[in-house]
Amino acid sequence: MFEKVLVANRGEIAVRIIRACKELNIRTVAVYSEIDANSMHVQMADEAICIGKAASSESYLRIDRIISAAEIADVDAIHPGYGFLSENAHFAEVCESCNIRFIGPQPRAMNALSDKAVSRALAKKAGVDTPPGSEGIVEKEQDALAVAKRIGYPVMIKAVAGGGGRGMRIAHNDISLVKGYHTARTEAEKAFGNSGVYIEKYIENPHHIEIQILGDNKGKIIHLGERDCSIQRRNQKLIEESPSPLLEHKFKKLRDKIGKAAVKIAEAARYTNAGTVEFIVDDHGNYYFLEVNKRIQVEHPVTEEVTGIDLVKAQIEIAMGEPLKYSQGDIEIKGHAIECRINAEDPFDDFRPSPGRIEMYYQPGGRGIRMETHAYAGYTIPPTYDSMIGKLIVTGKDRREAIDRMNRALNEFLITGVKTTISFQQAIMQDPNFRRGVYSTSFVEQLLGGARRELIEEKA
Amino acid sequence: MDLKDIKAIIDLMKKNSITEFELEQQDSKLRLKRGLNGGSSASHGDETVPMVPSQTMAAPVISAPTAAPAANTGEIDIKSPMIGTFYRSPSPESASYVDVGSEVNPETVVSIIEAMKVMNEIKSEVKGVVTQVLVENGKPVEFGQPLFKVRPT
């Protein structure tokens, strides 16, 4: 039983974790950078320790300072949230060697899925299809051209150490491939400290379907259904939903198949705790493994709403050594849930980040509304981290009700002082293709190109 | 010493989080230094992170963050540059590094902050006279926490 947990994160996910701990009667320790002194997670936690200046590299990414804080606060475990150090195997190892439980997958599972190329190889071995592409890292320009010739254009050049939608580019011919190959390597070196890239066939009109998995420390792994995250802008997710309208309407049997494939891959990696296995599904129902996200994800509430399972609590319980409370047969998908990521960005100005002080803040309420946020009236969004204000999760008895309820909720939402994506997400809720459930990852670009500004009314 | 021995030493360094290793023998000298991001594993979409300080390091001297003038009194705070446990003397039996009234110059060691079994000497960074000791011996301190007030001279 954990007495105290340190939350090595900030913003809405830190609040989420603190809430789960409180409900489990676990004391919480927040760590924060100087600029986050007034942040909600600092206010909510039982103890709070300042760990450095605003820059993440001086604070939330400082393993030494986080461990020092964990030591002086005498915690039993650390929850890393998402981003930051959540998928850093070295951090997980340091925690364990300091006798602090890491609430996430065990280091050996992280290492088995250490980068995207390694994960591809593991999936292949487990008998799961991956998009046609290179065997591992592409070392030379000639190899890149050879791979592209074999699989055919268009292709994706991806950084093996990339994540969160970063480090990918498309090439449509030899010229753009060569240029893209070298640029991608330079960018990857700068962004991830690893210039390794691999090449995959670019699947047209892809649907991004991901499977939530949970595994205990005894080797039992189950899946909790899918989330459809195809509504993206520049590879950043905007809207997620469960169940996937594509699977519900067209490929009902795929849920079981893809779910089983996800569990197979997790078992091959001897995965523990919470994770997400990402797939690409094309219009013909072919599915291909993309990568494993070895952490709790931003959009986890969507799965929680349709399965009734608290994933963060499950993470903590698994880390405490408890066996999984559920078997695959216990998991039922009921109703429909949609999440909108409310970001401080201006959709009328190419989604430029809009940090600053939130003046008025009134969040939607009523039936089926769940808001995950650290924001409040008077809170200043710092420019140093991501632009997320919070996540609005709406549940309905079916997809139609969920969409109408989300539209109603977005309409009620009042945030002044910063620009937000709310009006854009409302336009999506009203879009006929989205409502029909017919969309792929090209949806947002098409919507933006179609200039549906007449549907959007900006609040004063 | 052959490659196998060197590889064994490197593995031991990795396992025990040792950053530097130097061995001088009669006819040879070996010096190994590890990089900052924990060795060969790729970072996972996050920036690279500094390594945990190792047990073999001698007490490192760490500079405090820029001293800020305390409001209204003209005094300057000596702030903690790290997180750990604050000690006023080099060992339980010795006298405190400084007390109220002690004269300090920038190089004066004023306290130890212990983190992960490493004792870090904290320097004053300012020239003046200590007017207040703000933290009790043995108490935990966080980044930026004021430790002493100094009247600059």
Image (cartoon, coloured by chain):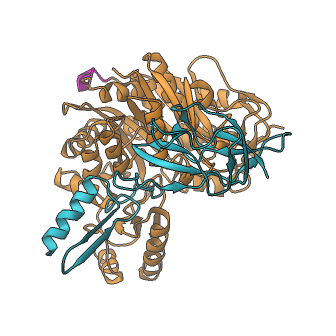
Image point (30%, 48%), residue name:
A110
Can residue A427 be seen? no
Residue A394, how many percent across, how many down?
55, 27
Quadrant housing the C terminus of chain A = top right
Residue A358, how many percent across, how many down?
76, 36
In the depicted structure, whether residue B2 falls above or below residue A356: below
Total count of labels: 0
The tint chain A carries is: orange
Residue A169, how many percent across, how many down?
47, 67
Q: Is residue A325 magenta?
A: yes
Residue in the foreground of this view, choosing between A36 and A224? A36
Q: Is residue A162 magenta?
A: no
Q: Is residue B6 left or right of residue B46?
A: left
Q: Is residue B145 left or right of residue A195?
A: right
Residue in the foreground of this view, choosing between A365 and B148? B148
Q: Which residues are magenta?
A: A324-331
The tint chain B carries is: cyan
Image point (19%, 34%), residue name:
A219
Q: Magenta segment, principal secondary structure?
A: loop
Image point (70%, 48%), residue name:
B103
Residue A350, how many percent across, how many down?
69, 57
In the depicted structure, whether residue A244 falls above or below residue B121: above
Residue in the foreground of this view, choosing between A448 and A12? A12
Q: Is residue A429 left or right of residue A174?
A: right
Quadrant housing the N terminus of chain A = top left
* Residue lying at the far right of the rendered structure: B72
Image point (59%, 17%), residue name:
A367
In the depicted structure, whether residue A115 falls above or below residue A278: below
Can residue A256 be seen? yes
Quadrant location of residue A451? bottom right
